[in-house]
Amino acid sequence: MNLNLFNDVPDGLTKRARTFVQVNGVKVDVQSIEDHRQWWLERDIPETVIDRMAAYQERWGGLVLPPAPDYDGGPRYLEADSPEGSASEGWWFEAGTQRTAVPYSFMIGPTGEFGIHAGQWAALHATVEGWVESLALAGHASRWAKQIVKVNGDDVDGIVLDGYEPVHEVKGLADTWWRGADSLVAVYGGEAKALSLPRGRTALIYSGLDQWGLRGGVKDSDR
């Protein structure tokens, strides 16, 4: 497997996330979706779904990023594969193979969401860009925070977010980020939803942040 610097950073990311990908990302070789198009067509996968996979592969295929703080690190690298679904439910496809042995797959949802599937679907972010933004923000916050506290299960409900604002660039669904006066809070709810496991919720509280630590140069106009 060949490794290359990921210089062609997709557009649609904030400056913080673009820098994160440029500094930390590498690219591995992945197969072209076109090599399998006919095989999938013969198995009644709609051509529009294969087109979505091809667009994902062109934009994100082969991107390797540092591990996520949750989901045992997330995908090893991004690669489209294994479409599944139906006309009534919609179609998903694999977003990349697991980095570790987790009981779910990382998938792209019917309308482009990034999430996990384990019998039940949990959309983590509304877009792949949101997932990348969350990784970039986690890397940034962990570097600049004076203290990081991890909270699990029912204790997540005890986190008081009055006065916090949502971090819009992560496009959070089951996973959300919140910005306060001197702290950032990341709430990971995907495992609780996909596995019907309330104790699977996790939150990380990054405190002691100044304005740079809170935003990393991202302005409201970058959302």
Image: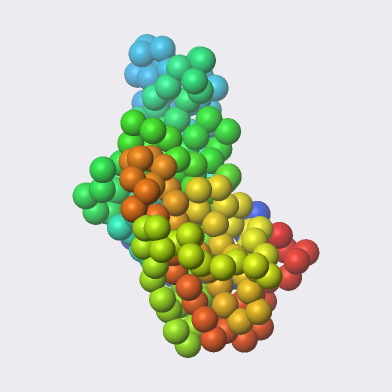
In this rendered view, identify the residue nearer to me: 210 or 30: 210
Relative to 15, 24 lies left or right: left
Looking at the image, is 5 positioned above or below residue 148?
Answer: above
Q: Residue furthest left?
A: 101
Residue drawn at (57%, 77%), measured in percent from left and top? Answer: 183
Q: Residue furthest right?
A: 221
Instruction: Tell me, yes or no, if residue 135 can be seen here.
Output: no
Looking at the image, is 147 positioned above or below residue 93?
Answer: below
Looking at the image, is 207 positioned above or below residue 118?
Answer: below
Residue 153 location, x and y as percent? 37, 58
Looking at the image, is 130 positioned above or below residue 104?
Answer: below
Quarter of the picture holding the C terminus:
bottom right
Residue 39 figure quarter = top left
Residue 97 location, x and y as percent? 31, 45
Q: Report the coloring of the rendering.
A: rainbow
Residue 18 location, x and y as percent? 58, 65
Residue 52 location, x and y as percent? 53, 31
In this rendered view, identify the residue nearer to me: 222 or 166: 166
Instruction: Tell me, yes or no, if residue 170 can be seen here.
Output: yes
Residue drawn at (68%, 70%), measured in percent from left and top? Answer: 163
Residue drawn at (56%, 68%), measured in percent from left and top? Answer: 160
Residue drawn at (24%, 53%), measured in percent from left and top? Answer: 100
Relative to 209, 181 lies left or right: right
Q: How many marks?
A: 0
In this rendered view, identify the residue nearer to me: 218 or 173: 173
